[in-house]
Amino acid sequence: MTTLYPNNIKKYAGTITQTKKKFSIRYKTQSRLFHIKDFYIEEYETLEQALTATEEYKKKWAIVNNLVKNKYELVKDGDNTYVKLYIKNDTYSFVDYDDIDSIDKNIWSVNKGLIKTTDIETNAKVSFHELKYGHNNIIHINGNKLDNRSFNIKLNEHNNKELIEQLNIAE
């Protein structure tokens, strides 16, 4: 298994600030603000090139210092490939490879046993199931709420017959 890193720059520790002359990377802990590096705009042909160089350095710095949120591994199981998404340290979730774009664009945490992210519009926590299926009325077949692969998910028919009718699912 190879560890892969997200494309989303927000998942990498540190903040990029811009002045007229430079981009700066800073990292804040609970007690201190550290200055990491400056990238002077005049040293690049365009502003975009300076920003790209700054973002690339931020990514590399965060990887070296193990400060990346939601890194993941692709796991090959026979003919199937799925994603092992690290939430923090030894906490991880399994998701289908087809869901990698959704996983990459959101920052995930565990809340009440489910992986959740913050909805940008409402600022509310939403589960992976709400994003993928539009509701949380599901059952994890193997009992592991962090195993979100499609074959492990089924609709909780016991709990909500109205939802089943809305989804046009035969009982």
Image (tube, rainbow, N blue to C red):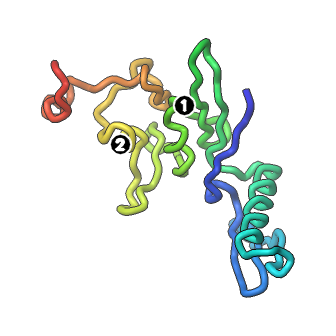
Q: Residue at x 59, y 36 (%)?
A: 85
x then y, percent, for residue 96: 51, 29
x then y, percent, for residue 160: 18, 31
Residue on which the image places disc 2: 130
Amino acid at circle 1 = Tyr
Mark 2 neighbour class, 10 Å CA radius: few under 14, some 14 to 19, many 20 or more: few
Outermost residue, front direction? 45
Query: Taking 146 as reference, is 61 left or right?
Result: right
Residue 42: which disc? none
Residue 8 in view of the camera: yes
Q: Along the line of sight, which residue is nearer the eye, 101 or 111?
A: 101
Q: Residue at x 73, y 64 (%)?
A: 52
Mark 1 neighbour class, 10 Å CA radius: few under 14, some 14 to 19, many 20 or more: some
Looking at the image, residue 137 lies above or below residue 130: above
Amino acid at circle 2 = Glu
x then y, percent, for residue 153: 38, 24
Query: Taking 28 as reference, is 93 left or right?
Result: left
The quadrant holding residue 74 is: top right
Residue 26 in view of the camera: no
> What is the quadrant of the N terminus in the image?
top right
Q: Which residue is drawn at 61% across and 16% down?
A: 77
Residue on which the image places disc 1: 97
Q: Nearer the viewer, mark 1 or mark 2?
A: 1
Outermost residue, right direction? 43
Task: State the separation of the CA atoms marked 1 and 2.
Answer: 18 Å
Outermost residue, top direction? 78
x then y, percent, for residue 92: 59, 34
**Local SS, label 2:** helix
